[in-house]
Amino acid sequence: MLEINNQYTLMKRRIDAEVLKAYFADTLEAIVDTLPIHIIPRERDPNRCCVYKERAMVRYRIMALLGVDIDRDDDEYKPLARYVGEALAAEAQPLPTLTTITPGCSGCPDEQYRITDSCRGCFARPCLANCPKDAIVFTNGRARIVEERCIKCGKCLDVCPFHAVIHVPVPCEASCPVGAVHKNDEGFVEIDHDACIDCGHCAQSCPFGAIAERSSLIHVARMLKEKVPVVAMVAPAIEGQFPGSLAQIKAGLVALGFTKVVEVAEGAHITALHEAQEVAERMEAHAGFMTTSCCPAYMELVDRHIPSLSARRSTALSPMAYTARQCHEQMPDAKLVFVGPCIAKKVEARAIPSISMVITFAELAALFVARDIDIKEIAAQEAPDSSLYADCRGFACPQGVSQSVLRRSSKPVQTMNINGVDKKTVRLMRSWEKRPPEVDLVEVMCCEGGCMAGPGVVVNPKIAMRLRQGADVARVGTIPLGGKKHV
Amino acid sequence: MEQKRISVKICVGTACFVQGGADLLLYEDFLDPELLGLCDIEGTSCLGGCKTDDPKWKAPLVEIAGVLYPNVTKQRLAELLREAVDA
Ligand code: SF4
Ligand code: SF4
Ligand code: FES
């Protein structure tokens, strides 16, 4: 997986902000077709082959931002201004969420292990000795891998004393836990939407930005501009995403024009209560382990790939669903927008009629930039009494869900957690049908590092974690970072 | 001769923070400890760059010994500090 903020994600944020600025200034349709030129001026030192290709990719980024299904509806003759008009007329969250940008895909070579020039053709030849398939041959005193025989086990890479063996993955394919991304016959990326669980790992991994999420940001911008009553339901991971306290972030959302800001941690409290009770009942009945059900990518994973876990999942609704229910009861006329770190939530939300749209923190960041809202300086909103659900803000972090359930349980509960789902964890979870884990509760989060490391976050979890613990943003860098990779 | 200390201010106004500034706050992770020892680094409120339309002032901004620099990446920060220390 790439770093959260890289040249590509930063460019994406800049494009989003420019589009929104123009939208709020009523100039979007007039300037959108020249925006790629404005963003990629001729003098730029390009990261792709040339500035013209970069401009083409900016155009695609804008299309993704407008929710266009680039796979199917890419019409090069159609001006962006027309896409804008159509996007503003649409009503629902666009699905499928992910789309591929074929012209951006580099058609990375198939996964391979290769022996480089650093091979010294040594006497010991550990590569040869360790290869289980006799795939290593020596020509001209140098080792070479016979591709047809290689099973990509990586043993030669581990043993070469000169680090002469390299592994070249296909980033998108390697990141997908369920094998839903692959290269098609032409060698370009394709997503099998029936298998895809919307975890977003592939979009986070492609170094060319060839996999994009279709956004609904423009619709949310429209709600704000037209001043319709709209509630922002903010996911627990929001704390630490912007340079200020949670109360300041809430004030920032109100300054954007949201009528009200509700923490999804409130719904998480109900989820945790429900799970605590359910797990107690299961223990009583010796029914074996139960898994959590709040991670929407995990829910899709089970539905599509691991049916044996269907009945293992808690019947609790997700924190978002409970929060939406409460908000809808209290303000039946308001539109509800979920703001979170997650792409799969976009799919989950489509099944909950009261929720209008889902945007990510990265998209919210673009709104703040476009509207010149500085979270660092804004006066904090008065904090409501949150004692009931404050601990459920931990739903954003690994073990946070199980801990919230434990706190609401009367009996001791044995837990384990799955922190991040990849191909290996999928195999492990499949094996539970035969060898169930000997615990009462399994917490599953598809993103390694929890929601704080989800595909829609803006801040490195190391920094976000310190801000969540109350560090002042001006001093946060002086707090020793420690050696831990994931918080 | 006593080395003068260099004052470094990383902009943590929202525009800079979300466009790469937050990553600069991980300076303990990527700066040479020797450089770190010579610099006083802290986050600061909006330095004003985001308020101008001049494309030159791209976020994130960093002020080093009183001079403003735009579009600072981790690598660029390390270079700039090295230059400031050697100057
Ligand atoms: S990582 Fe996948 S999508 Fe990205 S350029 Fe390579 S093959 Fe294409
Ligand atoms: S399951 Fe995840 S990694 Fe695989 S295609 Fe879908 S979003 Fe991409
Ligand atoms: S936020 Fe950094 S210059 Fe304004």
Image (tube, grey):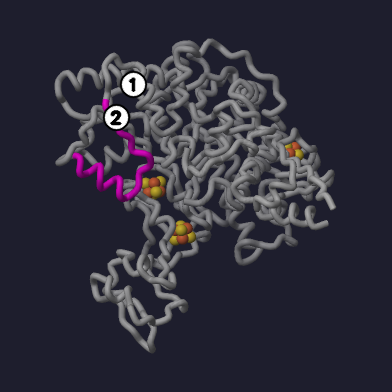
Residue furthest out toward the bottom: A140
Q: Residue A360: image x %, image y %?
A: 52, 35
Count of numbered marks: 2
Discs 1, 2 touching: Cβ within 8 Å: yes
Residue nearer the viewer, A155 or A181:
A155
Q: What residue is rendered at 49% in x and 35% in y?
A: A452
Q: Residue A24: image x %, image y %?
A: 69, 33
Residue nearer the viewer, A224 or A179:
A179
Kind of residue at badge 1: Leu
Residue A19 visible within the image: no
- In screen coordinates, is A243 left or right of A411? right
Kind of residue at badge 2: Thr
Instruction: Quickly name the residue at label 1.
Output: A406
- Chain letter, disc 1 residue: A
- In screen coordinates, is A172 left or right of B63? left
Q: Name the element at disc 1.
A: helix
Q: Residue A456: image x %, image y %?
A: 51, 39
* Image quadrant, ligand 3: top right
Residue A179 against residue A228 in the figure, above or below = below
